[in-house]
Image (spheres, rainbow, N blue to C red):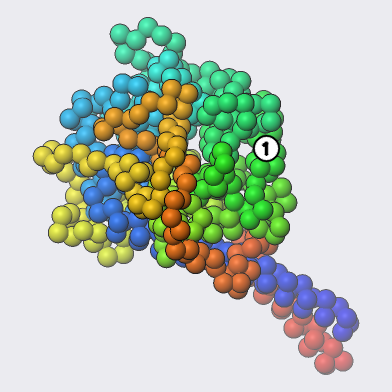
């Protein structure tokens, strides 16, 4: 009897321990999200359409549940001004502009089919335009269409090319898979960015399409092979925060644990790799570098995707649970920049302000860093310079990723304490906390009854 009681107590202890570890993991990620969300909004007080300080930023904040109402309304007002000024023509050549804006609008439960009278999904029906940017344009068109489960509209009457269908997009993506199992913006060797982004796009089809499942599994094997010893990733010769962030997003979208043995190198997970770039709410582009806006935005929404997986929420890009801005108030309902914005009402009027220009990556990098290669991923084969009104995109265009540091920069302390590492290293239990608590109480009751019976005997 004594042995049985001891076994029961051990079981209860293990169950409670597992609950604590899982809960601690979620709490740790939430802590990083809180600090990074605050950093992003305070450093970008006037968000507008753009690859940095705009669409990806709003999408990440909205999916994290940390988007302040007034801040989101500021973005919507500024975006509306841009759309009205260009009469719905966001770009003649970069259709990822439409994809990015569609995803952002969907994340705040706005209708991209009728935004200020313009159907921003319409250009994505033109497959010739979508394909112009290679695998990148195709991948983000599919994500944009699926994030709100949108029907593909008819293209404009003056378009006479091939019409987009989901089946054609999937065929093109699978046909672009390389011999090593991954995908690339150009060339015959897979890169982490494009491979991870493609897996994100294929996630909704993974369990219901055998061809997609086979392609994704090969892509996952490829990512496992190219993962670095500290858990991070690189694209080309350069290890970057953005590459690592895209892989964390992909694993979260497909439902794979960061503790999957394929993605643990020397005891380090991809999340560990991402945190090597972290410092005080921001992330650097390069190891030991200064805070970088693009890197911080991508790392932020990667952590959001990870937290959503841990918490059993909808996938990051499955936005049927998107909350409208008026319904998503922050605790104080105060804007980040109260002198400029007030919360609570959406304005349809033109602001009269010009569109906020997105900074180029070269403007954001400290002067001690020399740009040696500017990589425009949406059109890498052509290596075209973007115009002033069409800066490089964030996730779908990770620009200027290869740098050579010409002077020694001060190294940042980006590593967590050993205790924090251990708290986050494993996801030991996926069982809901409430269930484990109930089971623990029940088993505790049984143990108590048995001990009482033994005492009475």
Query: Which residue is painted at 37% across and 15% down in the image?
Result: 154
Query: Does 425 sit left or right of 413 as displayed?
Result: right
Q: Position of residue 133 (x, y in %)?
A: 44, 24
Answer whether residue 133 is visible to the viewer in this image. no
Query: Horizontal placement of 105 versus 307: left or right?
Result: left
Classify 10 Å Cα crowding around label 1: few (below 14), some (14-19), many (20 and above): many
Q: Picture coordinates of residue 75 (x, y %)?
A: 26, 45
Foreground: 110 or 396?
Answer: 396
Q: Position of residue 338 (x, y in %)?
A: 18, 60
Report which residue position mark 1 lands on. 222
Residue found at the far bottom of this picture: 456
| Residue 268 against residue 316 in the figure, above or below | below
Q: In the figure, 364 relative to 197: above or below?
A: below
Q: Is residue 26 above or below residue 233?
A: below
Q: Is residue 275 positioned above or below 313 on the image?
A: below
Name the residue located 59 percent from the left edge and 47 percent from the top edge: 233
Residue 321: image location, x then y, percent: 43, 45
Q: Quadrant of residue 22?
A: bottom right
Name the one closer to the observer, 127 or 421. 421
Quarter in which the N terminus is drawn: bottom right
């Amino acid at each position: 009897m004594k042995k049985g009681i001891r076994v029961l107590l051990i079981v209860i202890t293990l169950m409670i321990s597992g609950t604590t570890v899982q809960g601690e993991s979620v709490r740790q990620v939430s802590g990083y999200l809180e600090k990074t969300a605050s950093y992003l909004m305070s450093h970008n007080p006037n968000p507008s359409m753009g690859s940095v300080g705009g669409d990806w930023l709003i999408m990440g904040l909205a999916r994290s549940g940390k988007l302040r109402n007034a801040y989101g309304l500021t973005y919507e007002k500024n975006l509306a001004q841009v759309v009205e000024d260009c009469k719905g023509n966001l770009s003649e050549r970069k259709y990822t502009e439409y994809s990015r804006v569609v995803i952002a609008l969907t994340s705040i439960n706005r209708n991209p089919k009728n935004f200020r009278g313009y159907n921003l999904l319409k250009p994505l029906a033109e497959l010739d335009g979508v394909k112009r940017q290679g695998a990148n344009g195709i991948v983000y068109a599919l994500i944009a269409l699926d994030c709100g489960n949108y029907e593909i509209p008819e293209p404009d009457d003056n378009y006479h090319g091939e019409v987009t269908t989901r089946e054609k997009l999937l065929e093109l993506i699978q046909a672009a898979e390389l011999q090593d199992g991954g995908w690339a913006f150009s060339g015959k060797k897979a890169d982490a960015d494009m491979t991870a982004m493609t897996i994100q796009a294929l996630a909704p089809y993974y369990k219901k399409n055998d061809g997609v499942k086979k392609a994704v599994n090969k892509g996952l094997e490829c990512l496992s092979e190219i993962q670095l010893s500290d858990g991070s990733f690189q694209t080309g010769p350069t290890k970057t925060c953005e590459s690592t962030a895209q892989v964390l997003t992909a694993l979260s979208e497909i439902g794979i644990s960061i503790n999957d043995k394929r993605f643990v190198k020397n005891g380090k997970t991809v999340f560990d790799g991402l945190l090597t770039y972290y410092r005080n709410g921001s992330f650097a582009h390069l190891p030991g570098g200064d805070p970088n806006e693009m890197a911080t935005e991508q790392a932020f929404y990667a952590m959001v995707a990870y937290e959503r997986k841990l918490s059993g929420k909808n996938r990051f890009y499955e936005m049927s649970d998107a909350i409208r801005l008026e319904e998503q108030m922050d605790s104080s309902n105060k804007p980040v920049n109260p002198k400029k914005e007030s919360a609570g009402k959406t304005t349809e009027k033109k602001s009269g302000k010009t569109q906020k220009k997105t900074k180029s990556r070269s403007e954001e990098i400290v002067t001690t860093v020399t740009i040696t290669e500017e990589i425009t991923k949406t059109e890498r084969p052509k290596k075209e310079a973007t115009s002033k009104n069409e800066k490089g995109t964030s996730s779908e265009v990770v620009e200027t990723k290869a740098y050579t540091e010409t002077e020694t920069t001060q190294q940042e302390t980006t590593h967590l304490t050993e205790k924090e590492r251990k708290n986050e290293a494993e996801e030991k239990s996926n069982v809901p906390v409430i269930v484990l608590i109930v089971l623990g109480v029940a088993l505790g009751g049984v143990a108590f009854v048995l001990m009482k019976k033994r005492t009475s005997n």
